[in-house]
Amino acid sequence: MLDLTAIGDALSILSSSYIAWIYLIPGLLIGLFFGAMPGISITMAMAIFLPLTLYMDFLPAIIFLTSIYTGAGFGGSVPAVLMNIPGTSSAVATTFDGYPMARQGRHNQALGVALASSVVGTLSSYILLLFLIAPVAAVVLKMGPLEMFAIATWGMLLLGALAGTSLWRGLLAGVFGVLLGTVGMNTAGFVRGTMGVPWLLDGIPTIPAMMGLLAASQLLNLINTHYLIEDEADRKISFTRIIEGVKLAFQYPTIIFRGATIGVIIGAIPGVGSSISNLISYAETKRNAPDSDSFGQGNPKGVIAAEAANSSSEGGAMATMLALGIPGGGATAILLAAFAMHNIVGGPSFIGNNKDIVYAIIFSNFAQAILLLFVGLAFVYAASAVVRVPLRFLIPSVLVVSTFGSYAIEGSLSGPITLVIFSVIGWAMVRYHYPVAAVVVGLLLGSLLEQNLIRTWQISRGDLSYALERPGALLIFALMLLSIGITSFSVWRRRRRAAAEALTSEEIGS
Amino acid sequence: MKDHDTPPQSGQRRIDWGHLALLLLICGVVVTYLLDARATSLKINNLLLVEPAAIIALILAAFVLPQCFRRKSEDGDAAADSPPENWHNLAKVAALAAAFGAFALSLEVAGFDVATFLFVALGLYICGERKLWVIALFSAVFTLVIVYGYQMLVPYPFPLRIL
């Protein structure tokens, strides 16, 4: 599994020159800043700085870009915790418990928990990558559209687990999201639901829609509140509490390890990546937790699960990119572009001929993860000041930042218009207890589900027995059914126990 | 007999109009989308996911529909389910949402600088700030920072009127 000669060469490359190291901290800071800016994605941050890497050697260039990747991976969780705005799509699950923690005055702790989970998640994903890069490459090559459909369906069914008070409303919100996610031209070339609007041909812009549903809708709801945290005593920015959060995360190694494993596996699948891994990890942790009822109300375990998974997806996506030359998402596509700018072609031949470089990239990521802990602490401390800003200033300001961010994605009004429409829809859904996160997940997965279903249909020519030829997909479906079965059973058992306890306390009372 | 043991009086139902309107909106969007997709083509590659998903959405909506009609005796539950109408708060939300919509639509016409200044000023007023000098100063400084900040970061030009 490990090539010791290549590892030795990698260490000598990294120790022979300081050049590769000087880009680490600037890269992390750029990533943190951009990741924390709503509407500016990891991809955009990396794209903006890609031209700079032309003037660097290959290894420093890749280290600089992966530092931005690592920083932005955590940066997205800062607005997710403080303002319920996932800075990136991979921070959606972080909002579920991070934001309620912030509203309860535990923002310092939430950010500490998120930071430590991200650091450990990134670190463990690269350790896993070190050992698993070869086997992961072999597995990813065998993934067909049916397997992708199975994974996307799994993501969809998590909506049941994520749903709020009513299962029907949760599922309706999810299916509604999926339908919205299929608006525009599908892979077979059919155009639906665009109402003649040209920019809808590419589908509803997901990032502005997500910002509207999750953030702007909440801001409209907060209009009669004075501060994000009502109690003045809780509004303190405390370094000690941030550190407490860091320590708290380390008390749940199982959750971090589970999240990191899910993150690496899902992150390695092209096109799926961190936007789903954080949700799967969150749902799995919720399912296994004895206090699963408190998820969504500020349980730090939810933040740990989401952050460990989304940061470890980076390792998984890097595995696919390095081993196969296939970008799992926008960020790895930029890295591949950086490879091309230095006349290097990624893929099996690259990993075969340049194992020392691959190991050097992995080792530099260890350093990035460790440095992220310190740089992130300072960043989080500064960013926490937002809870001290009166909401009458924060609400219009964040709405404007979101609007600029949504405009920046395409450079057209499509983003701001989508943002406004979805913020009103989101406000109404929040008001009547529909889980808006379910719409977001549906929206993200809609086109992926349809694309893979059509491909499966085309390959199998409508023959259902095709599924029997795909044991991988059957295994995923079986795991999914098992997971749903266990969830239903544990919910049923918990309700029965609660009913029995209520009966006992009534008997004692009378 | 205790109060909560009183049997519900038949015929006394509370209609949650807001929830009903939202549900009808969702169903309207789903039906319109399905009809549009069917009008585009009836081929399997077009309807493979959309048609079953739309039908499932309508079935789910049918399950949710009874939740819009509650017996008055269930008021405790109903109150928890949908917030009590506070017309003053709703008016503030509507005003801010309308201002937000106008802001988004006017960005390219009025320029990002002017539109931002006006929206932030109006937003501050709607959200409760009453000192005019604070509104003017904050809106101006915020507009400068956001316009120049985003211009530096983003490769697209932002149409401006004054700055």
Image (cartoon, coloured by chain):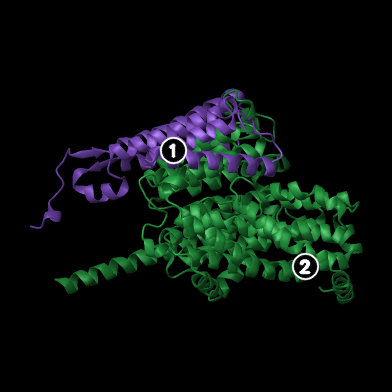
Chain colours: A green, B purple
Residue A76 in the image, given as x and y percentages of width and height = 60, 55
Q: Which residue is mark 1?
A: B123
Residue type, numbered disc 1: Gly
- Mark 2 crowd level (few <14, some 14–19, many ≥20, 10 Å Cα): many
| Left or right of B87 on screen, residue B102 | right
Residue lying furthest front in this view?
B133
Give coordinates of residue A87: x percent, y percent. Answer: 58, 51
Q: Nearer the viewer, residue A53 or A469?
A: A53
Counting from the top left corner in percent of width and height, residue A381 is at 55, 64
Report the residue at 54% width, 27% height from top.
B106
Amino acid tagged 2: Ser
Q: Chain ID for label 2? A: A
Q: Quadrant of the C terminus of chain B?
A: top right
Query: Is disc 2 on the same chain as disc 1?
Result: no
Percent across and percent down for residue A261 are 64, 66
Q: CA distance from mark 1 to mark 2?
A: 46 Å
**Depicted A121 relative to depicted A277: above or below:** below
Q: How many marks?
A: 2
Q: Chain of mark 1?
A: B
Q: For residue A175, say whether it is visible.
A: no
- Return the mark for residue A364: 2
Secondary element at image label 2: helix
Secondary element type, mark 1 = helix
Report if the CB atoms under discs 1 and 2 are less than 8 Å apart.
no
- The residue furthest left is B1
Nearer-the-camera pick, B153 or A405: B153
Count neighbours of disc 1 (C-alpha within 10 A) and say few if under 14, some if 14 to 19, many if 20 or more: many
